[in-house]
Amino acid sequence: MSARILFVTGKGGTGKSCVAAALAREALRRGRPSLLMRMPSSSHATGDEGPAEEDRTAKRRRGVSEPEEKILDERRDLESFLTRVLGLAFIARRLQDSSTFSAVAAAAPGLRDLVALTAITTEARRRRGVVVVDAPASGHSVPMLTAPSRVHDLAPFGPVAREAGAALAALADPRRFAAVLVTTPEELAVTEIRMLHDQVADAGVAACRVVVNGFWPAYVSKTDGDRIRRSKVSADAAMYIARHRRQLELVDALEKTVGHCPRIAFSFRRQGAEAPEQDIAAVLDRLDEDAA
């Protein structure tokens, strides 16, 4: 059995990279082999050691296990794709260096996106456990997920069609692939995630789960919240309660269209703090249920 792919995407700024890393760590904590795949455009690929990298270094010093990481490489992945299609590595390398092929690849709708997606699915077939993909933001992830069907429509026969067909089969199998759509409980973000959910489903992805990140905890009961708001003893407390309730309304409405949305509590600690472990564990539990 190949590794299951958790394809984590969402609008930029929703915390999808944090969620992806946390899911990979939780899978590893449960004893599953875990790989975190990142896009080459991420800060980790450029060597930018932000808070996340500093945290990983500190954890390694304390002996805390971290998941293996791999960055997609367009040139390497294209060579691997051409080798599978052509069957001969040296021809693949020669063709990759050809300006003619570069022009064809640029003109062929979906080819580069298909190469990236098949690099992920091929990696998963070689492994066990979980491959968590810190995917591009939604505007770039949708073309990647729709690439197999677009390419298959253009070339329904031959080795390229086989690659596209294999990718389509992976997307359609909830035991092999799940899209994790990360949003925040805000009006615009919720509206956009509904559209993204429909687009991902239309791409043929069978398992698609929306995760709400940054949800403000209740802290007090509804009765106590009403009492605090009426008393006007604290404008800050009243504002917090009102925002929490608005978030609750938005998520309840969202769940009526996309199903249950696991929630990750907002962290009021320093920027870059990790998502609460119990919330990430609940997300992974729900994703496991989707695969059952």
Image (cartoon, rainbow, N blue to C red):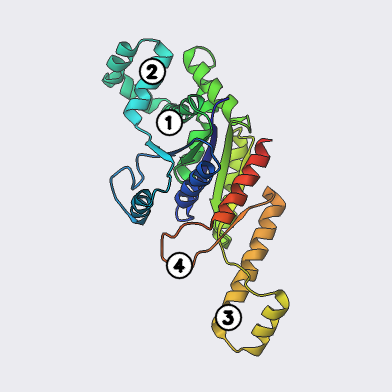
**In this picture, is 156 found above or below 191?**
above
- Under circle 2, the secondary element is helix
Instruction: Give the spatial CA distance, label 1 vs label 4.
Output: 36 Å
Instruction: Give the spatial CA distance, label 3 vs label 4.
Output: 18 Å
Instruction: Name the N-terminal-most of marks 3 and 2.
Output: 2
- Under circle 3, the secondary element is helix
What is the number of the mark on residue 116? 1
Quadrant including the C terminus: top right
Foreground mark, 3 or 4, reads: 4
Marks 2 and 3: in contact by CB < 8 Å?
no
Q: Amino acid at mark 3?
A: Ala
**In this picture, is 71 found above or below 160?**
below
Foreground mark, 4 or 2, reads: 4
- Under circle 1, the secondary element is helix
Q: Which residue was labeled with disc 2?
A: 82
Marks 1 and 2: in contact by CB < 8 Å?
no
Residue at x 48% of width, y 34% of height: 144
